[in-house]
Amino acid sequence: MNVRFADRRPEGAYVLALPMTSGALDAARLAALPADSVEFVRRAAVGLRFDGDAASTADLFVSEGGEARRVVLVGLGAADSDAAYERAGGALVAKLLLSGEQTLVVDFSGHSAAGDRAARLAFGALLRSWRYDVYHTTLKPTQKPSLTEIVIVGAGAGAEAGWASLKAIADGIFLTRELVTEPANIIYPQSFVERVRGPLSAAGVEIEVLGEAEMAKLGMGALLGVSQGSRREAQLLVMRWRGADTAPIAFVGKGVTFDTGGISIKPAAGMEDMKWDMGGAGAVAGAMLALAGRKAKAHIIGVCGLVENMPDGNAQRPGDVVTSMSGQTIEVINTDAEGRLVLCDAITWVQRTHGVKTIVDLATLTGAMIVALGHEHGGLFANDEALAGQLTAAGLAVGDKLWRFPMSDSYDKLIDSPIADMKNVGPRPAGSITAAQFLKRYVEDGVTWAHLDIAGMAWSAKPGATYDKGATGYGVRLLDRFVADNLER
């Protein structure tokens, strides 16, 4: 989707969209219409019960120059916020993407709240326009997107000023959605690396990749234990953005490119969804692209532990004991609790190799998180109040909401093992918390750490305001806003 900003409306065919705040069907807001159509549109809006509610729309036609002009009124609601404008942009694209229309003109003439708010509407529209039709070969013309251009008019100089940064964030989100959407025969550890290498390198991100031989020398027995049943070799992908001459912080992502559960195999029904068990790694890769694309003034290291969890004759067994890079031993009770085995070695590696003092990990880690929070919030666990507050605030600001869970010694005792330092699962109750307690054992003294369990957020069975059903791109905006608010001030 091409987005551009202009001083005046283009010639030719297009759909005209007019943003309306609640109850604001006045002449100034309708100034973009032919004068003899203003009263008609006002009455039509009343008849359609359109009153400017957030993301609501009213679709009608007026006569302009002897031609029929399609006009869409779109509601901004009563709140003057970025989210309201983004939702409005998403609503317009949801209505028009398959409509047969090719150009959407959004006219802000008569609006006092233009500038950056108009850019936010364009941002929401761009996010909602993303589709992945690579494997659709029999779509009818009416099933294919027709809308190719969005033109923002009358918003003033402020609208375009910040667009480059918003476009960079969108690019990061789109990379994440692409990675999460692709099937597991296309995206596996090695191909994940190659898929992100091009765009990240072009943006100035340094790339390093460790294979299984290198990880074995480092003693990463937890991560490699997950991978040993697969013909696909595990990878540790390291991405570094040096946007500032400061000590780095780390983002660590779980990248299980397909999760059968291993020997503790999952039920067949719904197993195809496990192609998106690398949603945490996808979010980290997308965030790195977004940060580099907008030239963030921060020093960030992104680490993705990439494995495939398969149940062949060499696969890890329940009851096996593995030794992690930290030297701590783990009794593997359930091979389907594999994400924490991947993350613990990645967390140890980034601490010992780069000396980071702040780590945020993201993972589609536990089904228990979906039971607890559904698909409305990601789970937040942290060993530091300030970091927890910063991440919560960042999530609220961009719509990637988080809800904090407790941690304590009482929960930690639930993963003690009789023959090793710990078990990889505790009892059924508090499953998300004991998973976080497991990871906390790998966080070294003096390191602030947060764990984001995004199991319910990486994929959606229904459309949202700025995404269609499928991959959401959750986590990219959260991490980007966290960096912007706390590292670039």
Image: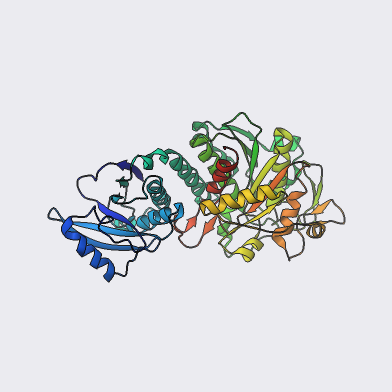
Q: Which residue is drawn at 80% across and 50% down?
A: 330
Please name the colour scheme applied to the rendered image: rainbow
Closer-to-camera residue (400/487) = 487
Residue 139 seen anywhere in this rendered image of the structure? no
x, y percent for residue 287: 54, 43
Furthest residue in direction top, as rendered? 245
Determine whether, in the image, residue 90 is placed left or right of residue 348: left
Residue most toward the left?
Answer: 66
- Name the foreground residue: 357 vs 322: 357
Count of numbered tags: 0
Q: Give residue 28's position: percent from left, percent from top.
A: 27, 55
The residue lying at 77 percent from left, 39 percent from top is 219
Point out residue 229 in the picture as x, y percentages from the top left corner: 68, 49
Extreme-right residue of the structure: 418
Above/below status of 18 relative to 167: below
Res. 45 visible in picture: yes
Q: Which of 128 and 238 is in front in this view?
A: 128
Residue sitting nearer the eye, 378 or 322: 378
The residue located at (66%, 47%) in the rendering is: 387
- Please identify the quadrant where the C terminus is shown: top right
Q: Taking 402 as reference, is 47 left or right?
A: left
371 in relation to 218, above or below? below
- Position of 138 relative to 119 (above/below): below
How far across and down, in percent of the image, does residue 419 sit?
A: 87, 54
